[in-house]
Amino acid sequence: MPDIETPERILIICAHPDDVDFGVAGSVATWTAAGSVVTYCMVTNGQAGSDDRTLTPEQIGAGRIVEQTAAAAVVGVTDLVWLGYPDGAVHATIELRRDLSRVIRQVRPQRVVTQSSELNLDRIFASHPDHLAAGTAAIAAVYPDSRNPHAHPELLAEGHEPWSVPEMWLMAGPTTPERSRIHVDITETMDLKIKALRCHVSQNAGWSDLDEVIRSWGAATAKECGLAEGVLAEAFRRVVT
């Protein structure tokens, strides 16, 4: 992995509550410990994330906001932005690109972490249609929208000046070494990642072996990255913009 400094500000864009914790919470804990200010932007409130038919989508979404806020605090994040798009019906529309560009111009991050826009049939759960759409829109918001003063002129009218993000890190997509794979050693922060995931009670309360599964994923990722036995890692595709 190249020697890359931890930036001052990082923005993480995901489709649903808990996506960030599965994909990048160990890295987030590492970055906040190093002094980075991390912001989460959730495209939806997770309103469709329950099989309980006695709950309305509004009730489900309200509960998941509480869960994600608690999970974020575990890894040192207190700034969360909720866009409120419909769970299960996210599309990479010009409106979503505009709203993400607004957040980018407000946060002014040096790094944006988001979900891969590429379908990965080896990890189909990571390739939920909402994930792909959120990733596609986030990539377009980073380049070219947020840096272009002529894109979404209403943002200028709101006082949001253009901002160029130097790099994106994409999670849950193809991350072979030939495709700019980068990893973060999360051996020391894995306990925090698991604690954050445990905050999502509506999603994980019945998952008795969650700890073992998440640790096995981290070990498998570390092995793929050529790291020593006993190391746990999260991996990404790094895109210099």
Image (spheres, grey):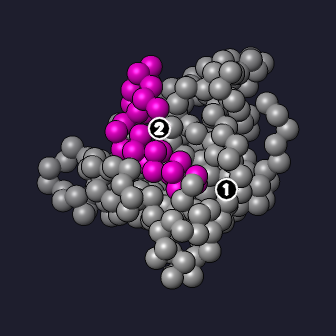
Residue type indicated by callout 2: Ser
Residue positioned 14% across, 50% down in the render: 53
Residue carrying label 2: 117
Is residue 121 magenta-colored?
A: yes
Residue type indicated by callout 1: Val
Region in magenta: 117-143
> Dot 2: few (<14), some (14–19), or many (≥20) neighbours within 10 Å?
many
Decide which of 10, 63 is in the foreground and name it. 10
Where residue 8 sits, quadrant-wise, is bottom right
> Dot 1: few (<14), some (14–19), or many (≥20) neighbours within 10 Å?
many
- The quarter in which the N terminus is drawn is top right
In the rendered structure, the answer to whether residue 36 lies left or right of residue 134 reads right
Residue positioned 49% across, 61% down in the render: 100
From where the camera sits, is residue 181 visible?
Answer: yes
Decide which of 40, 219 is in the foreground and name it. 40
Magenta span: chief secondary structure: helix
Q: Secondary structure at mark 2?
A: loop
Q: Secondary structure at mark 1?
A: loop
The residue lying furthest to the left in this view is 54
Is residue 109 magenta-colored?
A: no
Q: Is residue 47 above or below residue 108?
A: above
Residue carrying label 1: 165
How far is the residue under mark 1 from the one under mark 2?
18 Å
Position in image of residue 185 (x %, y %): 73, 34
Position in image of residue 204 (x %, y %): 39, 40
Residue positioned 58% across, 69% down in the render: 149
Position in image of residue 189 (x %, y %): 69, 41
Decide which of 1, 202 is in the foreground and name it. 1
The residue lying furthest to the front in this view is 150
